[in-house]
Image (cartoon, rainbow, N blue to C red):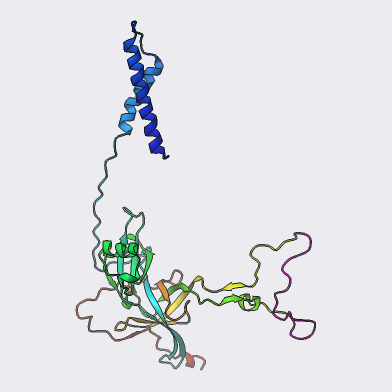
């Protein structure tokens, strides 16, 4: 029984007790003055009538979120994007240096829900990626998309933002949300390796390869001490399941973006296998110049829609191979 139901039951019992006491006093021949206990009950029941009244609903003003460029402050926090990992390749920059590249595809990102401090208690944007049929979604998921009035999406992700970085519902987000040369943090699920031994999972050296070893070349060796403590401590590095966990690679450098195909070329590796979803957001440690970032996202201006050629990071005007000379 909840606390509200228990309090109502107590008040109703006190009302019934008062009614019985009033009947017995009216039936008596000699009228007696009310006792202090009866006066306390009358005062308690009078105040309980006020507590039983339903509280009035407070109507808060509706927040108006406009889709227009703003000014980013050092404390501002933009939303991130959802991308699909397409694989890795290698490119050569203008100086002839080979750059290991991971290609990420930003597939039709839109704002599927706006969370505010008045309703949900937090400022955040829910981003949807891709497309999916209704028959491949659960009924709660379909109801969520229909309640928000947005298309059905394949993947959802919530990004906490500041109040000045909120975007209207249904806003489309593309690769121009980031700029070449910027550092980002990429989060994904690592590739599952299954059950692996200590040498592969933790990088153990292993036992001797020839002399002094018998069928224990790749074993992890001793795992404990003697009679004291007489146990294996928790967290001991041992064979077990490897991979399949969420990890974040920090300070990933954006080499190039292609607005036509919504592709992002980043330097190095990111977590996950080909076809997995990754989540990209502004780097926490290596922050870009805030005046160069579109805030709260990129809005095409007049005449900019025709400029859809790929954008490459600025590599400077000094050949790095000639610095030694």
Q: Compared to 113, does 102 lie above or below? A: below
Per the picture, the main secondary structure of the magenta-coloured stretch is loop
The quarter of the rendered structure image containing the N terminus is top left
Residue stretch rendered in magenta on the structure = 208-229
Percent from the top left, x then y, of residue 153? 32, 71
Q: Compared to 236, does 13 lie above or below? A: above
Which of the 4 quarters of the picture holds residue 257? bottom left
Residue 149 placement, left or right of 161: left
Nearest the eye: 49 or 78: 49
Percent from the top left, x then y, of residue 248? 48, 72
Residue 29 visible within the image: yes
Nearest the eye: 305 or 9: 9
Which of the 4 quarters of the picture holds residue 217? bottom right
User: In the image, what residue occupies the spot 39% across and 78% down?
Assistant: 84
Seen from this angle, which residue lies furthest top?
30
Which of the 4 quarters of the picture holds residue 311? bottom left
Residue 193 placement, left or right of 21: right
Q: Compared to 273, does 19 lie above or below? A: above
User: In the image, what residue occupies the spot 46% across and 91% down?
Assistant: 97
Percent from the top left, x then y, of residue 55? 29, 39
Magenta-colored stretch includes residue 209: yes
Magenta-colored stretch includes residue 18: no
Percent from the top left, x then y, of residue 31? 33, 7
């Amino acid at each position: 029984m909840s606390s509200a139901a228990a309090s109502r039951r107590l008040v109703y019992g006190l009302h019934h007790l008062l009614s019985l006491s009033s009947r017995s006093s009216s039936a008596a021949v000699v009228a007696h003055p009310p006792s202090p206990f009866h006066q306390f009950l009358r005062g308690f029941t009078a105040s309980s009538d006020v507590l039983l009244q339903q509280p009035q609903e407070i109507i808060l003003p509706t927040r108006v979120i406009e889709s227009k460029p703003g000014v980013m402050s050092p404390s501002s926090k933009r939303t991130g994007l959802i991308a699909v990992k397409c694989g890795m390749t290698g490119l050569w920059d203008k100086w002839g240096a080979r750059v290991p590249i991971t290609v990420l595809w930003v597939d039709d990102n839109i704002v599927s829900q706006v969370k505010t401090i008045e309703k949900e208690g937090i400022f955040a944007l829910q981003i949807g990626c891709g497309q999916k049929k209704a028959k491949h979604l659960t009924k709660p998921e379909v109801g969520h998309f229909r309640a928000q009035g947005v298309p059905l999406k394949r993947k959802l992700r919530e990004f906490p933002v500041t109040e000045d970085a909120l975007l209207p519902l249904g806003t489309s987000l593309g690769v121009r949300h980031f700029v070449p040369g910027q550092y980002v943090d990429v989060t994904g699920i690592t590739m599952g390796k299954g059950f692996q031994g200590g040498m592969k999972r933790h990088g153990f050296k292993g036992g001797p390869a020839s002399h002094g070893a018998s069928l224990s070349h790749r074993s992890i060796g001793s795992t404990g001490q003697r009679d004291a403590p007489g146990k294996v401590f928790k967290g001991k590095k041992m064979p077990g399941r490897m991979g399949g966990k969420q990890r974040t690679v920090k300070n990933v450098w954006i080499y190039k973006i292609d607005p036509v195909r919504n592709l992002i070329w980043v330097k190095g590796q990111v977590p996950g296998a080909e076809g997995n979803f990754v989540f990209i957001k502004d780097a926490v440690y290596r922050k870009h110049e805030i005046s160069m970032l579109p805030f709260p996202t990129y809005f095409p201006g007049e005449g900019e829609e025709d400029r859809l050629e790929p954008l490459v990071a600025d590599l400077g005007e000094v050949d790095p191979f000639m610095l030694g000379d």
